[in-house]
Image: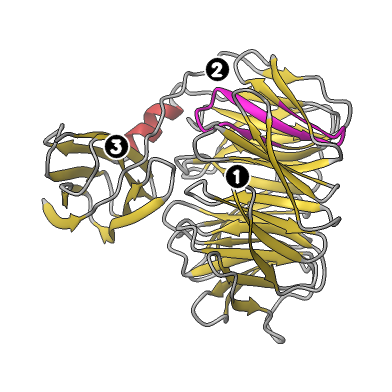
Amino acid sequence: MRTLLYSIATSLALLLAIPALAQDVTLRGHNAEVFFAAYSPDGVHVATASGDSTARIWNAMTGEVVDTLVHGDIITTLAYDPTGARLVTGGFDGFARIWNTSTGELMTSVSGGPARVRWVAIDPTGARLATAGFDGVARIWDMSTGAPGPVLQAHDLPLYTVLFDRTGTRVATASFDNTAAIFDATTGALVMKLDDPVEGHTGRLHSATFSPDGSIIATTSDDSTAKIWSVATGDVLQTLAHRERVNWAEFNADGTTLLTAAFDSTARLWDPGTGTLIREYVRQSDALVTARFSPDYTRFATAGFDGASRVYDVATGTLVREVAATARLYWVEFSPDGRRILTASVDSTAAVWDLPTSGVDDLVAAARPTIGAAPNPTTGELAVSFSLTAASRVRLELVSASGAIVATPLEASLGAGDHRVRIDAAGLAPGQYFARVVTRDGTASTPVTVVR
């Protein structure tokens, strides 16, 4: 057994157990297309953003409306904070609005001008909000007060997305000017613009996403490619070719696989280090707008203009479930426990779809890591032990109670078997904590109680 020592003075994230849903639920009540939908962090509620100028919060089990939030103009984006206590909506009126999810009350509104807010993102701590505007400017705001922070300027045309890295220290923007940019999230300083005149994109961008370790960024574009960029140098490392516009990309847990969704009706898995195509999925009959990994990265789901969402097993490539809405889909994401998917549709509805668990869950569980900690409760030194069923790139994360990853005690390639990381918990405040291990086969977490 391998033993490492790591000292910390910060808290760990609380992860919640989520009940299973017994059946599919259609969320009806909007009067215009539903552009976006998201689960609350605890999986109890879902929120939807609509062209009818409202967002709605729904009971994910029953489909009942819990609250209707009147934004004032078309809403195309929304995001929960890490605790689920606040929800942010972004609209065509140029405002992002922050709502109390318990009461439905508007807490504050922020705006940098009349330009549409195309995307909103909240940093892992829940302290800062980033907005992406059609004026080509991203802005950082204080989530508690609404006070303006840094203004991020590097583009001449509208922004499509703005996303934080997993540490919350950097922000990436994707623009219709064919470029992406990286900013310091605290100062607003431009770190780098990704605009290689020879190997860069030749069409507008739709996303720019950091890898888990922050060393590379994946961008997607109208030019039918996704590109992998070095964050250190700004060089294009790989060009991943589709046949039409690439709309979305995201990394798996350890950054060894990239998932792309394109208008050529395919989703693809790639090795971002070599640019090698791992597998192509071609069941859709129309454009794909997004593809999302499940929380444990063992599955992914697609959303297409053909009104279908398909869920695949990453390891085998087999189709787990296919669901069909009545009209084109704009978005899909998994529930926090990975047992359901949520879709948003042009037909004014969203839907929660149950996923099969029999057999598949047994296979997935066999591959997932296991984790434990002792002594528990602890007053000082803590040993976090975990077992791997196969060799993997491994990351042990320590996360604050608000959701920020504040330390990574271990990030290495390890063999199958038992491993142990010793942590000095003497500096931790008393309370309930969790540690989480992330591998290519999934994630596992364990509770820790610190006492004095």
SS at circle 2: loop
Is residue 342 or residue 434 the one in the foreground? 434
**Number of the front mark, 3 or 2:** 3
Point out which mark residue 277 bears: none
Point out which mark residue 21 bears: 2
Real-space CA distance between mark 1 and mark 2, rounded to the nearest whole angstrom: 20 Å
Is residue 346 or residue 44 the one in the foreground? 44
Q: Earlier in the sequence, mark 3 or mark 2?
A: 2
Real-space CA distance between mark 3 and mark 2, rounded to the nearest whole angstrom: 27 Å
234 sits to left or right of 298: right
How many C-alpha atoms fall within 10 Å of the one at disc 1: few (<14), some, or many (≥20)? many
Image coords of residue 121 (percent x, y): 62, 50
How many C-alpha atoms fall within 10 Å of the one at disc 2: few (<14), some, or many (≥20)? some
151 sits to left or right of 329: left
Question: Which image quadrant for residue 6?
Answer: bottom left
Amino acid at circle 2: Leu
Q: Is residue 164 positioned above or below 300 on the image?
A: below
Secondary structure, magenta segment, majority class: strand
SS at circle 3: strand
SS at circle 1: strand
Q: Which residues are magenta?
A: 37-56
Seen at 55% across and 38% down, the residue is 318
- Is residue 301 visible to us here? yes
Q: Is disc 3 in contact with disc 2, using a CB cutoff of under 8 Å?
A: no
User: Mark 1 sits on what residue?
Assistant: 292
- Is the C terminus in the top left, top right, bottom left or bottom right quadrant? top left
